[in-house]
Image (cartoon, grey):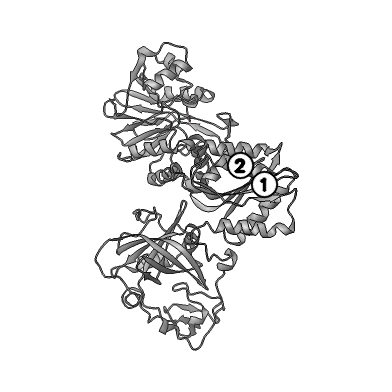
Amino acid sequence: MYCIKKITSDLTWVGANDRRLAMFEGVYSVPYGVSYNSYLLTDEKTVLFDTVDKAVQHRFFENLAEALGDRPLDYLVVQHMEPDHSAAVKELATRYPKMKIVCNTKTQAMLHQFFDMEIDSRLHLVKENDTLSTGKHTLRFIMAPMVHWPEVMVTYDSTDKILFSADAFGSFGALNGAMFADEVDFAKDYMDEARRYYTNIVGKYGVQVQALLKKTSVLEIDMICPLHGFVWRRNIQDFVTKYLQWGSYEPEEHGVMIAYASIYGNTENAAEILAGQLRDKGIKTVMFDVSVSPTSEIISAAFRWSHLVFASATYNAGIFVTMEALINDLVAHNLQNRTVALIENGSWAAASGGLIRDKLEKCKNIQVLENTLRIKSSVKASQLPEITAMAEAIIATFPGTADRKPQNASNVVAPNVANESVDLQTMTKLSYGLFVLTAKDGDKENGCIVDTVIQVSDSPIRITAGVRKISHTHDMILKTGAFNLSVLTESTPFRIFEHFGLQSGKNIDKFYGCGYDDRSANGIRYVPEHTNGVISAEVIAAHDCGTHTLFIADVVQAFTVSHEPSVTYQYYSDHIKPKPVLPKEGKASFICTVCGYVHESETLPDDFICPLCKQGATAFVKT
Ligand code: FEO
C-alpha cells in the first residue's frame, strides 16, 4: 500500500523509510533509521527528483504510481548518483519508457558505470544555470560538485521557491510521520543526527559546501527538500547558519571533548581525572571511549566542541587501534580550528602521543598543546599536578576565562547581607541606561534586561556589563564569550521589559514568535524596535562580583538604529514601570523598597528574591 505525503499542491513526497538498515554506507550506524526522499512534481509535465535505495524501492514504486495516477512520467532529474538515491533508475527507466533523464555529463558517465543499459538517447543534459520549463514551474540546475560526489547538482524551482538540495541539508533518522522540520522539536531531538550526518557524509567538503551556500544565497528560498530527513519550510536560515558554521569548521560550542582508548582502564582514569578538574573550573566536558562509541558520533562531537583531548594507550609501538582509526578519520574529514591536548600511556615505550601529534599536523589550524601528559602504566598521585597543569593550559585557551571561577561556586547567589548604613533607594539614584543583553549558545538564544553597562576605554573600545548570575544569558556569555546590547529608548513599552526581564530563558524561548530575527555580524540576535543602537562585544575577562558577574568586553561592532533618546533607569521608573499595587487592607505583606512589588505574607524568607527587580529580602519592609 502506498504511503505518500503532500508537500505543496504540486509536489508530493514519494520516498520511503528504512529502519532495518544497520550501517548506512556500510560505515555509519543509523539507530533511528534513514529516509530516502524522492519528490514528484505534477505540472503540465511530471518530474521526479531522484529515486531511492534498493532496500525500499518496492514501496517507492507503489508511491510513485499512486502520485502519478493515470499520468505518464515525463522527467527524472538525477541530482546524485550515489545508489541510495539512484538504485531504482534502471527499473524506473524500464517501467516508464518515455521518461527523459535530466542530468549533467558527469552523471551520464556514472549512469554507464552503474547500469548496463542503453540510456544516452533518453538523456536531457544540463549544465550550470540551465533551466527547464515544465508548464507553470521553471527548474534551474545548479552544480554542487563534491556535496557529496562530483556529479551532484541541486535544483531550484523558481516558481514555488523550492530548493531541491540533494544530500545538503539532510539528516540521519527515518521520518516518523512528520514531513517538515517545524513539526518536531528539531533542535532538541534531531540536531545531533543532522550534525552526525553532515560531519560524516560531507564534513570533508567544507569548501564545496560553502561554495554551494554562496551560490544559493542569492536565491529566495521558501522551502528546502533534501534527499534525507525533513523538508524545511520555516526557520530555514537557522539551519543554513548551522551549515555555514559546520562548513567553515568553526566549533559550535566552547567545551572539551575527551576521547580515550584504554586497555585496562588506566588511560581512562587519567582522562576522567582531567575531565573532573575541567568541570570543577566551569568547563563543559563530554567523554567517549573510542572502543565503544561509534566513530561517527565522535567525529560529530569533534566538529561540535572547541577543544579536544585524545588519550591513548600505546599498542604494538603505535597508537591503540581504535584511536588510530579515529584520528585517521578526523584527518580525512579535514577537521580544522581546534585546540588539542594529548595523553599517552605506555608501560615501557610510550609512543601514542607523538604519533597522534604527527597525524594532526596535517590538519589546518589545529593547535596541539606542547606538553603531552605521559602515564607509565597507571596514574600516580604525584602526577596530579601535571593533570592540573594540563587542565589549566586548556582553560587558558578559552576566551574570557582568565578569572573563571568554579562553576558551582560562581553560580551560587551570594547571601544578602543587611547593611543598615546602605539605603538601597539611594543606590537607585545612580544613573543607568537600560539594555537588552542577548547571547547565543549553539541553537539556544536568550536575552535579558541589564542596566549596568559602561564604556571604560576608548582604545581599545572596551565596555563592562554586570549580569546577574541566575540569568540564563549569563551562563551563555560565560561559555561563549560573546553578546549583543540593544540600547533601549524612552519609547520602550513595559512589555519589552516584562518579556526580557521578568521571565527566565531557562523556561521559555524568548525569541519564539516575537519576530526579532535581525542579527549582527556575530550571528547573535538583537532587538530592532525601541532601540537606538546595537553593540556587539567579545568578553576578555569575567569577574565574580557576588550576585553578578562583571564582564569586561571589547566592542567588535556598533551601529545606530535610530536617534531617539536612550532610556535611563530614572525615566523607566517615572514613566514606564507600572505603579505598585498597594497592599490589601488588613493583609500582612512586605513591599520592595526598590521596585514597589508587594508580597502578601506573614513572613518573608531570608532567601526571598523580588520577582520584579530581583532584589533580595533585605530590600523589603513590612507594611
Ligand atoms: Fe545520500 Fe551521497 O548520498
The quadrant holding residue 583 is: bottom left
Q: Which mark is residue 344?
A: 1
**Mark 2, other Cα within 10 Å: few <14 / some 14–19 / many ≥20:** many
Query: Which residue is farthest top?
Result: 118
In the rendered image, residue 274, in percent from the top left (x then y), is placed at 65, 55
In the rendered image, residue 510, in percent from the top left (x then y), is placed at 42, 59
**Mark 1, other Cα within 10 Å: few <14 / some 14–19 / many ≥20:** many
Q: Is residue 185 visible?
A: no
- Type of amino acid under label 2: Ile
x 46%, y 81%: residue: 591
- Type of amino acid under label 1: Glu
> How far apart in space, not on screen, are marks 2 and 1 (Cα)?
9 Å
Q: Which residue is mark 2?
A: 356
Q: Is residue 462 visible?
A: yes
Query: In the figure, is residue 73 to the left or right of 304?
Result: left
x 40%, y 63%: residue: 554
Q: Does the beta carbon at disc 1 come under 8 Å from ligand 1? A: no
Q: Are marks 2 and 1 in contact (CB under 8 Å)?
A: yes
Q: Establish if 361 lies above or below 620.
A: above
In the rendered image, residue 386, in percent from the top left (x then y), is placed at 66, 57
Q: Establish if 313 lies above or below 462.
A: above
Q: Earlier in the sequence, mark 2 or mark 1?
A: 1
In the rendered image, residue 525, in percent from the top left (x then y), is placed at 38, 56
Query: Which residue is farthest left?
Result: 563
As rendered, which of 29 and 203 lies closer to the eye? 203
Q: Establish if 419 lies above or below 399.
A: below
Q: Secondary structure at mark 1?
A: strand
As rendered, which of 249 and 365 lies closer to the eye? 365
Q: Secondary structure at mark 2?
A: helix
